[in-house]
Image: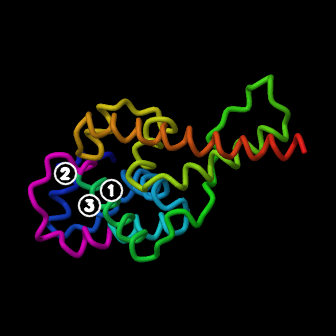
Amino acid sequence: MHLTDSEILEQLKNSNSQGLEHLFRKYYSFLTRTAFYLTGNKQISEDLAQEVFVKIWDHKNKLPIINNLKSYLSVIIRNSALDYLDKHNSGTSHLKQYMYFDNRSDELTPQQIIELKKQLNLALLKLPPKCRLVFSLNRLEGLSNQEIADYLNISKRTVETQISKALKLLRVELANAWKQYFAGLLL
């Protein structure tokens, strides 16, 4: 049985644990994915997502009027992940578990593709967390700038600025990495 967000919120406000179960089923993967883009760690992302559900349940009687539940939850998980990163200063300590490079290039050897993937993932981890989140939502999830703006409750212009910033930083970082890589090959 699929409930609307309004029905889920109503169940929560009435202390009905089924509302929490419906909320969990509907949004758990969304929350863990969002946290993963910021932390780069699957276990931490799962823990942060579960903490969101605990917070919601603990404050079910004090929930504000929520017009867009997905946006509300995205703000909570984003803030939780950023708080975690601030406390543990681990924004770049874990290598991304996904690879952001398409293997279809005929011009690169398999070793070069592996090296490029490694350098790209390391460069992604050097982006500021908010910038990395916006970039990942755009390039990995395929969301439009407007969808990202709605999802993160920020302006479309902010999304465009963050993507531009990410591309600029990645260009510089990858250019330096490849110069070193090819210099090493030539020697």
Q: Earlier in the sequence, mark 3 or mark 2?
A: 2
- SS class of the residue under badge 2? helix
Give how far apart the Cα atoms at labels 3 and 2 are.
8 Å
Q: Earlier in the sequence, mark 1 or mark 2?
A: 2
- SS class of the residue under badge 1? helix
- The residue to which callout 1 is attached is 22
Colouring convention used in this rendered image of the protein: rainbow
Inspect the image, locate mark 3, and give the three-letter code of the amino acid beneath it. Answer: Gly
Inspect the image, locate mark 2, and give the three-letter code of the amino acid beneath it. Answer: Glu
Answer above or below: position of 152 versus 141: below
> Callout 1: few (<14), some (14-19), or many (20+) C-alpha neighbours within 10 Å?
many
- The residue to which callout 2 is attached is 7
Q: Residue at horizontal 49%, vertical 57%?
A: 36
Residue 172: image location, x then y, percent: 56, 41
Quadrant where the C terminus sits is: top right
**Of 78 and 91, which appears nearest the observer?**
91
Tag 1 and tag 2, C-beta contact below 8 Å: yes
Q: Residue at horizontal 45%, vertical 70%?
A: 47
Q: Residue at horizontal 14%, vertical 52%?
A: 66
Residues shaded magenta: 53-71
Residue 82: image location, x then y, percent: 37, 64
Inspect the image, locate mark 1, and give the three-letter code of the amino acid beneath it. Answer: His
- SS class of the residue under badge 3? helix
Give how far apart the Cα atoms at labels 1 and 2 are.
10 Å
Q: Please state if 111 lies on the left or on the right of 89 as rendered.
A: right
Tag 3 and tag 1, C-beta contact below 8 Å: yes
- The residue to which callout 3 is attached is 19
> Callout 3: few (<14), some (14-19), or many (20+) C-alpha neighbours within 10 Å?
many
Tag 3 and tag 2, C-beta contact below 8 Å: yes
